[in-house]
Image: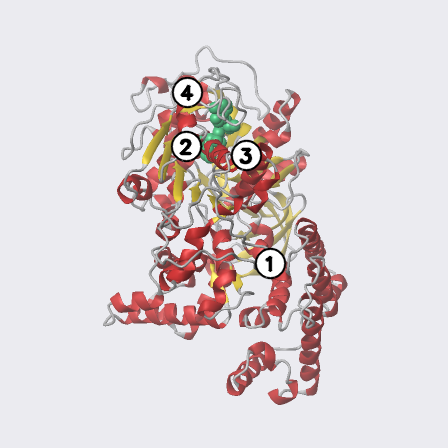
Amino acid sequence: SSDGQDELLAGLNPQQLEAVTYRGSALLIVAGAGSGKTSVLTRRIALLLREREAWPSQILAITFTNKAAGEMRERVAGLVGDVARGMWISTFHSACVRILRREAEQFGFTKSFTIYDSGDSRALIKRLVKEHEADAYGFTPGAVQSRISKLKNELTDAEGYARQANMSDPAERKFVDIFGDYQRALQKANAFDFDDLIAQTVFLFRAFPKVADTYRRRFRHVLVDEYQDTNHAQYSLIHELTRPPSTDSAPEPYASNGMMIFEPAPEAEPDAPMTGASLTVVGDSDQSIYAFRGADIRNISEFERDFPGARVVLLEQNYRSTQNILSAANAVIGNNFDRKAKNLWSDRGAGDRIVGFTGYSQHDEAQFVADEVESLRRSGIPYSEMAVFYRTNSQSRALEEIFIRSAVPYKIMGGTKFYERAEIKDALAYLVAVANPADEMAVRRILNKPRRGIGDVTETSIARFAVDAGISFRDALRSPGALGVGPKIQAAIARLDAVLDEASAILLPPSGEVPPATSVAEGLTVLLNKSGYFETLRASRDPQDEARLENLDEFIAVARDFARNNPDGSIVDFLTEVALVSDADDLDDESGTVSLMTMHTAKGLEYDAVFVTGVEEDLIPHRISAGEPGGPQEERRLFYVGLTRARKRLHLSLAMTRAQFGEVTVAMPSRFLQEIPAELIDWRQSPGDVNSRGRQSAAVNGRPGFQKYGGQGASTGRDRFGVQALPKRDSLKPLSTAMDRFPNKVTGKVRDNGDLELTAGDRIRHDDFGEGRIEAVTGEGAKRIAHVRFDTAGQKKLLIKIAPISKL
Ligand code: ATP
Ligand code: MG
């Protein structure tokens, strides 16, 4: 049925066509950005379904974000209709949660286990580091956390690590103890951390081959997008899933709440031994940007070894970007030395040149972005087709300030931010305390939130009573009289206990009845109302509490949305969804807004117009990458990802000075800028404009593309910064020569206010933020911090010693 008019195959180039229609056991599609990898994966799934080569339930497709999963599902549905609903299109984490919830009871967990996000596991590790007095060995919670995470990504568990550790080293012994205790604490709390979700699924499959076999029989097609960013644990999971089933028992149909229904493919011969699932992976080693989280490019290079007979398809035509954008990206990535050269081309035409801009400060840079956004919109590009990227989250602040002032609608991609707020964490802890009472951390978190007079001493009494009585911390709340605490505290505990029970009756009715999905919002409202949480915030005069109330309202709205989208959803489903919100999943999907996000989050996305901001040394490549093996190369790939998101318009901007944490530093143009052929960039205001006016021309780096103009022949009036504009140029001399232009402001890291006397009530002036009033001074010596309420710039905390401030 694949004639030339076939809509599913229409417009594909020969390599894409081969990739969509290939029917072997293993297929690797390697190709540069925008060459249609994700599109090919989507069409391949659609074709399998339409040709009835597979049932929806037999397909497992892995995407990098929940958002990407949603989009792929929609596209497949658009191509073949509603059958797409039964498919597992999800992230690794979501797929593993589904498997683990089904199988949890096999290994000592319950279906309602909690998922610890990075903040939760950090809190637990912090407690353990303290208990073990491990800071004496130089352990910080963060370092322990990332070490445990790395080990788990390598599939090394606590016992495995203990066996190979050098136990004669006391620091090593400490780590082994903490790792072990951490794992035991998770198990006791009926919880998995993020890395566990993958690792424990692999362990489960290895420990219970029969369990593994059910999934091997079920999934006949496994497809993985963004394969270059899989780590060892994820790779092993793919391996486990695509092995031939090892036992010869007949496939058994599932009927657990309609989640999995096994339907043999129509043409399957029941007696024939089943082979492993067919595996399709697509990736681009030039876009591997998660090595720091254990992703391993070797997963691509060794694919052919691990899957003998695999077909490899290369795609070389880019359908996304204009040639200018592509040429810039190709030139940059060409500087990485450990890669295979690619020949990526586009027939979209040369297109506009890349626009370059150098601001004096990040505010200046942000103003350029905002102005340019407005002008693009007037030229017909909608806000939703524009995106602004940065390397680190903290860079978004300046952009946001200017966007708000300029009334440019925007959203920050990075839903995790919302869920990291203390009040949202509190609300979640209330829900978890009901859904998974074994999760002691959650119950402890809400014990005195809002304040109800339950202090540390009482908390310890509860914990001790629970241990002595052999019951959970949660259940200890049921016997306040036995805790040896005063009557007021007993009453407070009894009230909390009653609130949790009341919510539990709504969310997990003792009748065993399945509550409607709306019960989540209802239960949440009860918890926040009856616990006094809302009341305390409403009674507060702190303006921040106002914002907290709004956030909680928003959270209840999220719960209502959930009910609309998942009519059969339970509280556990809701908590899963929330726990798996990732950076790329924005809360609401407004279309009329500009998207702001980190370059990491931008992976896989595309926009008509893209702004890559902060193109400076120490930002991209980031300072922390300098010491890492392969660090600068990974940063180059990250930059490449940023550039290749743009369809038509690409902007690269930087600031000469960057104020962060009360410190103004001099910025230098990123080395990556110099790797872009000069003729591709149209500098609206170049580094040369602002640092070398009137100086002699000089070649930079000896490259012809970086010939510097002098000031001769210049003069096109003054720009809005009062600086005389010069003709277009391509100079990229380090900006340190600009120091003399900012005698007071640009001081690198050397500004020193000595022992500037400041007390609450004083008025000060700040170089960037203007005038303001000191509200409090905290800390000591070089770490003294002024809490300032600026007249126009809002509240800020400044390090007094180095902030560019003076007393009025
Ligand atoms: P990335 O590496 O950034 O993930 P990709 O290789 O997954 O990119 P896609 O996102 O699938 O690329 O495709 C890039 C763009 O090119 C999309 O807008 C897609 O619709 C379009 N495209 C892909 N193949 C074709 C084709 N044969 N004809 C026209 N447009 C195509
Ligand atoms: Mg893609």
| Amino acid type of the residue tagged 4 in the rendering | Asp
Q: N-terminal of the two: label 4 or label 1?
A: 1
Q: In terms of image quadrants, where is residue 213?
A: bottom left
User: In the picture shown, does residue 537 fall above or below 216?
Assistant: below
The span from disc 2 to disc 4 (Cα, nearest Å) is 21 Å
- List x then y, in percent, for residue 747: 45, 40
The span from disc 4 to disc 1 (Cα, nearest Å) is 63 Å
Q: Is the CB atom of the residue marked by disc 3 within 8 angstroms of ligand 1's nearest atom?
A: no
Instruction: Confirm whether residue 640 shows in the render.
Output: yes
Residue 19 left/right relative to 457: left
Instruction: Confirm whether residue 618 shows in the render.
Output: no
The reply to whether dot 4 and dot 3 touch (C-beta < 8 Å) is: no
Report the residue marked by disc 3: 388
Crowd around label 1: few <14 · some 14–19 · many ≥20 (10 Å): few
Q: Residue at x 31, y 46 (%)?
A: 627
Q: Nearer the viewer, mark 4 or mark 1?
A: 1
Give the secondary structure at mark 1. Answer: loop
The span from disc 3 to disc 2 (Cα, nearest Å) is 15 Å
Q: Residue at x 54, y 25 (%)?
A: 7
Report the residue marked by disc 2: 640
| Amino acid type of the residue tagged 3 in the rendering | Val
Residue 257 is tagged as 1
Give the secondary structure at mark 2. Answer: helix
Crowd around label 3: few <14 · some 14–19 · many ≥20 (10 Å): many
Residue sitting farthest toward the top: 713
Give the secondary structure at mark 4. Answer: loop
The span from disc 2 to disc 1 (Cα, nearest Å) is 44 Å
- Quick one: 49 or 451, which is closer to the camera? 49
The span from disc 4 to disc 3 (Cα, nearest Å) is 23 Å
Crowd around label 4: few <14 · some 14–19 · many ≥20 (10 Å): many
| Amino acid type of the residue tagged 2 in the rendering | Tyr
Report the residue marked by disc 4: 730
